[in-house]
Image (cartoon, rainbow, N blue to C red):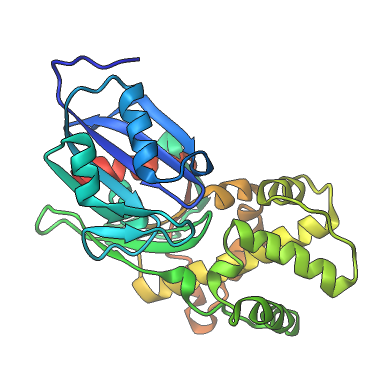
Amino acid sequence: MHISNRKTYSIVADVGGTNTRIALTQGAVLQEFSIQHYANDQFQTFEQLLQDYHHSQGLVRCESVCIAIAAPVTGQRARLTNRNWIIDQQSIQQLLGCGSVKLINDFEALALSLNEIGAEHLQPISQSRGKLCGGKKIVLGAGTGFNAAQLLDNNLKGAAKVSCAECGHMTLPLESAQELRLRDYLAASYSRASVERVLSGQGLVNLYQWLGMDKKIATDDLTPAQIAAAACSGDDPLCVEAGELFSRFFARVVGDMALAFLPFGGIYLSGGVSRGLAPLLKQPAFLDTFHAKGRQSELMKSFNIQLITSDNSALLGCAAAL
């Protein structure tokens, strides 16, 4: 569907390591008809992808652009963490002839979307015991990589503020002898065992392959989606154990972040791997591990956890940022 040339639109994009989601927005309203998903492997640069989308929409005038990037954003250009793409404000302005280009971290966009997401795109994982109150919200997600961000309470000044992080590069929290063997395996391949080496698409593959090695069981060349599907269906015992390990580490990291930020406004889980393993996240084992914080176990029951089921949420955050 082509847009009317008499209207001015902005472009919003969520650029991950594997896929890019892109859409038009008018004001702060996302134009649902315009949402498209691209596989990044089909393009050598982000500019090529953006130009393809621009032409597909028959867009004559673009007012502004906001791009959420799976990488730290500190200036006018950013390099993706898990893909050799550089996204540059000036290059995009020249390409589209738009007035402004805003670059933000992808989890900043997700955090900005938390007040915009409809209930139909949220799945409850746990309900807090007490009455929900306002306050900080956090979003954590496992996809091509892993990260988190918090949306600060905006009741006083009316403007949302986001604090970003690079949580995927934190040290993986380990507790058991089995997990210490996993650490040695990861350290041999990556020099250290970080959160992202387990809580990501490749991380799920790492868990599956390590379990096969640890148990001396032959493994197949499976994708993250295949492992997740087999883990949830119960078709492959090794995939099931990999999914359960993933769930345990995810619950532990989410619990650590809850203690760090005290997000009484809610905890939101995002990302393609999180959604792929959703049935496991709803099992008692996930919450049991999340609550297992010693003297603060009762406090952990104060947090409401929901899974974001839509993979377009960051686009809402980009629209809010504009």
117 relative to 266, above or below: above
Which residue is pictured at 74% across the width and 82% down the height? 181
Which residue is pictured at 61% across the width and 55% down the height? 281
Residue sitting nearer the eye, 51 or 67? 51
Left or right: residue 35 versus residue 142 is left
Residue 115 in view: no
Which percent across, then down, holds residue 184?
70, 83
Which residue is pictured at 67% across the width and 81% down the height? 183
Left or right: residue 180 versus residue 289 is right
Q: Quadrant of the C terminus?
A: top left
Left or right: residue 98 versus residue 87 is left
Which percent across, then down, holds residue 44?
45, 45
Which percent across, then down, holds residue 80?
41, 58
Residue sitting nearer the eye, 154 or 109? 109
Which residue is pictured at 90% across the width and 65% down the height? 217
Which percent across, then down, holds residue 144?
53, 55
58 relative to 284, above or below: above
Q: Quadrant of the N terminus?
A: top left
259 relative to 127, above or below: below
125 relative to 122, above or below: below
Residue 94 in view: yes
